[in-house]
């Protein structure tokens, strides 16, 4: 664990430049997606630049992946998916298609929150490490793939079963 702390501490500026915008993105998201706050436009204006910053710094942080290429591949894949989803949401916003914008923004948020799902998966690996004899560098990559994939499957299932709004 001390070695893990050293990895993140040695790149504290990069870590903070990733975590703080991600936290702001998560805090602003309900205001941007909720109909209750549809009259407030500033949260959505901040959401897209914050998301871009989160994506750029995630690419930079992947250079220092604890789990090697397996972790890096998960980060590169899901970060690209995050930025693609965010870009699609932006395009639908510019085309004034709020329903489609919301769907793509939900996808982006699901990917971003995949890191939160990764944490309990890592907890299982840490808890069972005395039996499996796996070190963090051996299971971090798998935990990333599992955590992000769970979120993606759940949100895609939700979006596929959610009906399209009635067209007038």
Image (tube, grey):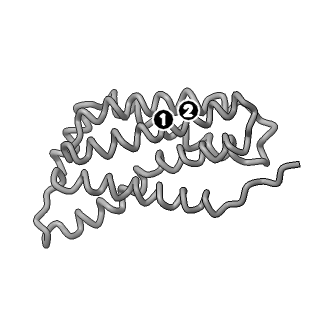
What is the quadrant of residue 94 in the picture? top right
Element at label 1: helix
Residue 109 place in picture, x, y as percent: 54, 46
Crowd class of label 1 (few under 14; some 14 to 19; many from 20; radius 10 Å): many
Contact, mark 2 vs mark 1 (Cβ under 8 Å): yes
Q: Specify whether 78 is left or right of 73.
A: right
Q: Is residue 119 shown above or below 44?
A: below
What is the quadrant of residue 130 in the picture? bottom left
Residue extending furthest toward the left: 133
Q: How many numbered marks have been drawn onto this rendered protein structure? A: 2
What is the quadrant of residue 87 in the picture? top right
Residue drawn at x 34%, y 34% is: 15
Q: Nearer the viewer, residue 24 or 118?
A: 118
Q: Which residue is mark 2?
A: 87
Cα separation, mark 2 vs mark 1, equals 6 Å
Residue 51 place in picture, x, y as percent: 52, 33
Residue 66 place in picture, x, y as percent: 21, 44
Q: Which residue is mark 1?
A: 83
Residue 31 place in picture, x, y as percent: 69, 43
Residue drawn at x 58%, y 30% is: 48
Crowd class of label 2 (few under 14; some 14 to 19; many from 20; radius 10 Å): some
Residue extending furthest toward the front: 167
Q: Specify whether 145 is left or right of 105.
A: left
- Residue 38 is labelled as none
Q: Nearer the viewer, residue 36 or 4?
A: 36
Q: Is residue 80 shown above or below 4?
A: above
């Amino acid at each position: 664990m001390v070695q893990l702390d050293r990895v993140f501490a040695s790149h504290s500026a990069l870590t903070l430049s990733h975590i703080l915008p991600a936290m702001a993105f998560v805090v602003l998201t309900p205001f941007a997606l909720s109909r209750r706050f549809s009259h407030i436009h500033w949260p959505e204006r901040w959401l897209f630049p914050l998301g871009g910053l989160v994506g750029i710094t995630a690419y930079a942080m992947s250079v220092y992946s604890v789990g090697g290429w397996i972790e890096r591949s998960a980060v590169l894949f899901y970060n690209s998916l995050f930025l693609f989803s965010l870009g699609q949401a932006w395009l639908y916003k510019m085309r004034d298609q709020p329903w489609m914008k919301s769907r793509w923004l939900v996808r982006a948020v699901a990917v971003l929150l995949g890191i939160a799902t990764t944490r309990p998966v890592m907890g299982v690996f840490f808890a069972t490490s005395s039996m499996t004899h796996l070190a963090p560098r051996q299971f971090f990559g798998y935990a990333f793939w599992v955590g992000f994939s769970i979120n993606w499957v759940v949100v895609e299932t939700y979006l596929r079963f959610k009906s399209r709004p009635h067209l007038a």
